[in-house]
Amino acid sequence: MLAVALAALATAASPVQGSVFGPVVAVKGSTFTITTSLSPTGRSLISAGSARVSEQATAPRSALKVGACVMATGSKNSKGVLAATRISVSAPVNGKCGGGFQRRAGGGNGGGTPPQGGGRPPGGGGSGGGGGFQRPANFGFAFGSVAKLTGATLTVNGAAFGSSKATTTTVTVSPKTTLSETKTVKAQDVALKMCAFVRGTSSDKGKTVKASDVSLTPERNGSCTNDFRGVGR
């Protein structure tokens, strides 16, 4: 019986991979606290000293250029042309587009199970089609490298939605298209009034999380929406 009890205790204390999301309410060095419904206490203490940290901010139109990595969402017409409502831009890494964008595209933003074992970040399901989230029939998505830029039209070479299959998508940009830019920052750059989406491990159901990836956006109108939905946002 003692051996069984010890085994159960060891299993319960084993780190679990998952994600939490919420506004930053306290910062101390490379450690910060967010409020989140994904923790049983309503808060998660995040250790980000060894994490990969990125920040999204409003990008100028000039950020759209040949060679840039983009993730665009919007509506697609019968000819397969995507009218973008939102485009996220990042620099290629080792000459390739991937990293956080690709994980969101293929695995969903709420990717995996949050540390406490259920739920997803506010604002939708994952990008894999689960969680009760249904996209409009004309939903369009494009992720990859900008191969050509003519006026307000982009040619994007990359992966098909939810897979690694190569595809080419024509994307159009309008004055209503929201442009954001992703930059790599340091854990010490996390600040109050930021919204954080955190991937990592926890052995206490999300009360404390050792982060592997942290994505940051500014608050909007004093609150956080799930700007890390990637293909859903």
Image (tube, helix red, strand yellow):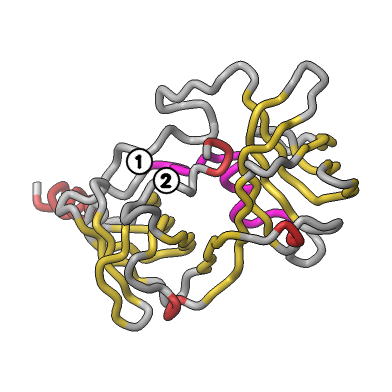
Report crowding for label 1: few under 14, some 14 to 19, many 20 or more residues within 10 A (C-alpha).
some
Q: Residue shown at 59%/48% (left/top)? A: 103
In the image, residue 203 lies in the stretch drawn in magenta = no
Outermost residue to the left: 1
The tag on residue 226 is 2
Up-down: is 191 above or below 97? below
Q: Residue shown at 49%/48% (left/top)? A: 228
Up-down: is 60 above or below 36? below
The tag on residue 122 is 1
Q: Answer yes or no: is residue 16 visible.
A: no
Instruction: Name the one closer to the observer, 80 or 150.
Output: 150
- Identity, as a three-letter code, of the amino acid under mark 2: Asn
Q: Mark 1 and mark 2 in contact (Cβ < 8 Å)?
A: yes
Outermost residue to the bottom: 29
Q: How far across and how far down the image is residue 186, in percent? A: 50, 78
Q: Answer yes or no: is residue 73 visible.
A: yes
Q: How far across and how far down the image is residue 105, in percent? A: 61, 41
- Point out the stretch of residues depicted in magenta: 97-113
Question: Which label's residue is closer to the chain start, 2 or 1?
Answer: 1
